[in-house]
Image (tube, rainbow, N blue to C red):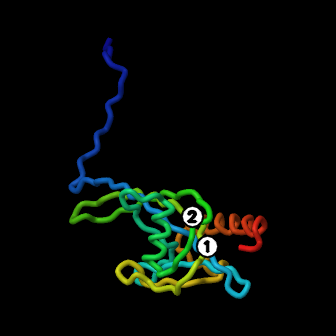
Amino acid sequence: MHFTTSSRRRRKTKKPSAHPTTKRRVVSAGGVVLRSNEGALEALLIAIKEGRMWSLPKGQVEQGERYPQTAVREVREETGIEARVLAPLGSIRYHFTVKDDATPVTVTKEVHHFLMKYVSGQPRPQKEEVDDAAWFPVSEALTRLSHQNERDVLLKALARWEIGAKVSPAS
């Protein structure tokens, strides 16, 4: 008879990759900026990646900054628009991979979004980071946004905007 001394299975070990993946965490904040234009509600979007992608304005939180401050600053920097924060909309998290030299880096990005109201200015894209900045009727903005998670944030903002309009119609 043959007895084994261990009931544990051997685990397969992964072969080390030729280029080990490193990880990076990025925290950003941005806003859904809305305005009423001749009775129609519009949302402010930015175009990136040579105009192939439309997105909500956002950027990295700087040291000592609170999320709402970052949202206001990033909207101003990326679009030239002054806006004020009305309410938090929560955050989204997603992952993507970039190359740092030859090493793949998995980036986990967490973006804190805010409902924002237009104050002043004309869209003027920050050419170093943004290809275009423009106002769109909200129905068109929902179709232009490249990612479902940002469409969901816009829908959440619209629901909050409607609640706010019912509470304070004079704003």
Give x and y (percent) for residue 162. Answer: 73, 68
In the structure shown, which secondary structural element does the residue marked by tag 1 occupy? strand
Front label number (1 vs 2): 1
Quarter of the figure that contains the N terminus: top left
The foreground one among 106 and 28 is: 28
Residue at point 62%, 65% (across, down): 86
Residue found 28% across the figure and 60% down from its top: 104
Q: Say if 98 sits above or below 25 in the image.
A: below
> The C terminus lies in which quarter of the figure?
bottom right
Q: Nearer the viewer, residue 171 or 67?
A: 171
Query: Relative to the observer, which residue lies in front, 21 or 154?
Result: 154
Vertically, is 65 above or below 132? above
Q: Position of residue 163 (x, y in %)?
A: 74, 64
Spatial CA distance of label 1 from label 2 is 10 Å
Q: Are marks 1 and 2 in contact (CB under 8 Å)?
A: no
The image shows residue 53 at horizontal and vertical percentages of: 47, 78
Q: Which residue is mark 1?
A: 117
In percent of width and height, residue 29 lies at 47, 63
Q: Is residue 106 above or below residue 166?
A: above
Residue furthest top in the image? 1
| Residue that badge 2 annotates | 114
Q: Secondary structure at mark 2?
A: strand
Count of all numbered marks drawn on residues in the image: 2
The quarter of the displayed image where residue 42 is located: bottom right
Residue drawn at (23%, 48%), measured in percent from left and top? 16
In the rendered structure, the answer to whether residue 34 lies left or right of residue 110 reads right
In front: 101, or 5? Answer: 101
The residue drawn where x is 49% and y is 66% is 71
- Which class describes the residues within 10 Å of circle 1: few (<14), some (14-19), or many (20+)? many
What's the amino acid at mark 2?
A: Phe
Q: Amino acid at mark 1?
A: Lys
Dot 2, how many residues are within 10 Å of its Cα: few (below 14), some (14-19), or many (20+)?
many
